[in-house]
Amino acid sequence: MPCIIVITHNNADTLRKALESLVNSELVDEIVVVDNNSIDNSQSIIREFIIKYPFVKGLFLKRNVGFAAGVNVGFRACESAEPYFALFNPDAIATRDWLKKLVEFMDKNGDVGMAQSLLIKPNGEYDSAGGFINGLGYPIEFRPKVNYELLRRVKPYEVGYAKGAAVLIRREAYLQVGGFDNRFFFYYDETDLSYRMRKAGWRIYVVPSSLVFHIGLGSRIPNKELFVLYYLERNHLLFLNKNIKTRLIPALTWSLIGALHEHDGARLKIRVRAIYDAIKLMLGHLVSDPINLN
């Protein structure tokens, strides 16, 4: 059965319920939790599950390497990643058959590289029903106008990218494209992987009958608004340079104009830093992650 990889960083508020939902899911017999040096109660919760469930494994990293690198670490630790492995967020709640539905679909469709669950917020709104990557390199989410209970009856449909909160990935496809790019650290990691898979000829689907509730709180991060702004700005440019080079110069110009029109000094500073670091990464230099906002 597929190995499930969970990446954590200060997710104690939601982690216990996420893991409880996973251990009670069908087909689950291996869970690898990669902790990115949490300083809250996350590591204690993980150790509780390791003691209680022999099929739960914990990897405790000495520094925060981000989501992309964390998945690559977890993948190497999986014993049952053939033919698939799954990603699951620590702020999500699985329904019992979420994984079974994804596996059944992938078993019947050998050209599918990734299959995503239907992600619903606790209030019943859509978190992700799939999406596409537009010509400027931005991921655009579908926002269906029907109740998700109706959408669950729809057959699986093809999309442009999969969200990593609950997704099944074909090992062959993952290895063919080189796995996640560690440079993305946070945001655009799954967008980049999806783009490369589709370019390599693999297809990506949403399986609406596979339902997962996504709380969406994420990690506890100081100055989270600026943190998110930095990585969205930086990694969008990095994504374009890597995958859609013809759009890089217009996007870089637009980013500079947008930064210079910021009236908030902190936002101006972080956007300029993001552009600078994106260029460094494009040139093959290293940058320090996670960004220090102090």
Image (cartoon, rainbow, N blue to C red):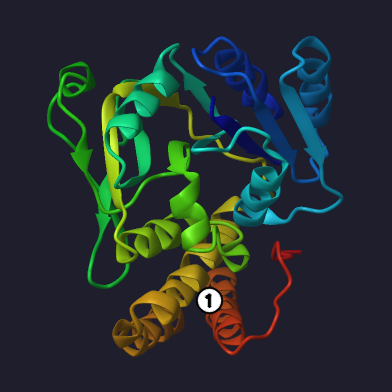
- Residue occupying image coordinates x 30% and y 29%: 105
- Residue 115 visible here: yes
Residue sitting nearer the eye, 205 or 11: 205
SS for tag 1?
Answer: helix
Q: Residue reaching furthest right?
A: 62
Residue at image coords 34%, 34%: 106
Q: From the image, which quarter does the C terminus lie in?
A: bottom right
Quadrant of res 185: bottom right
**Rendered location of residue 241, percent (x, y):** 43, 81
| Residue located beneath label 1 in the image | 268
Between 16 and 253, the residue placed more toward the observer is 16
Q: Amino acid at mark 1?
A: Leu
Q: Percent x, y for residue 174?
A: 49, 53
Count of all numbered marks drawn on residues in the image: 1
Q: For the residue carrying disc 1, how many other residues have a C-alpha within 10 Å: few (<14), some (14-19), or many (20+)?
A: some
Check the picture and name the quadrant holding the N terminus.
top right
In the picture, residue 230 is in which quadrant?
A: bottom right
**In the rendered view, would you say 248 is above or below 99?**
below
Q: Image quadrant of residue 278? A: bottom right
Above or below, comparing residue 77 to residue 268 in the picture? above
Q: Residue at x 76, y 28 (%)?
A: 57
Question: Residue placed at 33% from the left, 52% from the top?
Answer: 161
* Residue sitting nearer the eye, 47 or 277: 47
Can residue 10 be seen here? no
Relative side of 89 to 255, left or right: right
Residue 207 is situated, as x and y percent measured from the top left of the image, at: 28, 30
Q: Is residue 71 left or right of residue 214?
A: right
Please tell me whether residue 205 is drawn above or below residue 58 in the rendered image: below
